[in-house]
Amino acid sequence: MSYLEATNDLYKEAALTPDVGLCCTTNPIWQFPGLSVPKIMQEMNYGCGSTVSAQDLVNNPKVLYVGVGGGMELLQFAYFSRQKHGVIGIDVVDEMLEASRKNFRIAEEENDWFNSEFVDLVKGDALHLPVKDESIDVAAQNCLFNIFKIDDLKKAVGEMYRVLKPHGRLVMSDPICEQPMNDTLRNDDRLRAQCLSGSIPLKDYIKVLTDAGFGTIEIRARKSYRVLSPNHYPTDKLIFIESIEIAAIKDPMPSDGPCVFTGKTAIYYGDEPYFDDGLGHVLMQNQPLAVCDKTAAALAKSNPEIHISESTWHYNGGGCC
């Protein structure tokens, strides 16, 4: 049995019998005005964060969500879209698709505004998306891509890039791990399917995104997720796993490399009213400006009277690059 078959089996079980403890998100369940999320959807929330952000969902976007789970985030996306076929949910597991269809009927009863026709549920593979090129405004996945081994991860990200319109957004939440894992952990298909042993370092995760062509990367959240301890897992040391929320934007790749925002700011504290580096970055005296990591490094070298903050791993727009 391959690791992908093990994953499909695990989520078939989770579709037939909801497993509240399968994933462990520290996010609240977003309850927007007029939105009721059915209890069964909350129980089948198999994610490690959230991919739903109002800033991404303007002007009636066409949304793609891969790995439907119980349908909760599909419902939340539909809350903003509210149009027939506005949201596409893709999953390779028949039982999960059927569970979501049932859950959407419950959602119709609890939400006067919701119609199941807002969401198209389609059987498909993340590595071969049944979606047209450049047809999607916002693509999302939650705690799925970390399951893939590196070659399949590149394929999955490449598929998302293909279907996104120019300047479209790939919004994701996944576990990451900065520590090395032994081969026993890495090769345990069940642990990989449980979103544990497939976790990779953040820099490697970002590189897959930028290698695919995404010119702008936003790190929106970075949180504690799980620990793999020697008394429960085949490891002789404690391994700390975090979850991230990240947006990759299909902007053109800058000539000097991608813009990666990790929550850094620059503050000019010199005697002049402002500092202009001549490259499009103007810092008003004592006013923080959000900057990407490469701009932060350049500004630090250009003027000793600029303070560069540490990464907060939280960025929600603004500033410059």
Image (cartoon, rainbow, N blue to C red):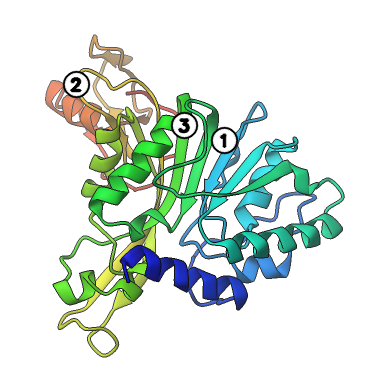
Q: Which mark is residue 55?
A: 1
Tell whether 145 sits left or right of 133. Answer: left
Label 2 vs label 3, nearer the camera: 3
Circle nearer the N terminus (2, 3)? 3
In the figure, 293 relative to 39: above or below? above
Q: Residue at x 29, y 22 (%)?
A: 253
According to the picture, the residue beneath numbered tag 3 turns out to be 163
In the figure, 194 relative to 207: above or below? below
* Label 3, label 1: how far apart the Cα atoms are: 20 Å
In the figure, 19 relative to 264: above or below? below
Q: Nearer the viewer, residue 179 or 141?
A: 141
Q: Residue at x 67, y 29 (%)?
A: 60
Circle nearer the N terminus (1, 2)? 1
Q: Is residue 261 visible?
A: yes
Q: Of the residues shown, which amino acid type is indicated by label 1?
A: Gln
According to the picture, the residue beneath numbered tag 2 turns out to be 256
* Label 1, label 2: how far apart the Cα atoms are: 27 Å
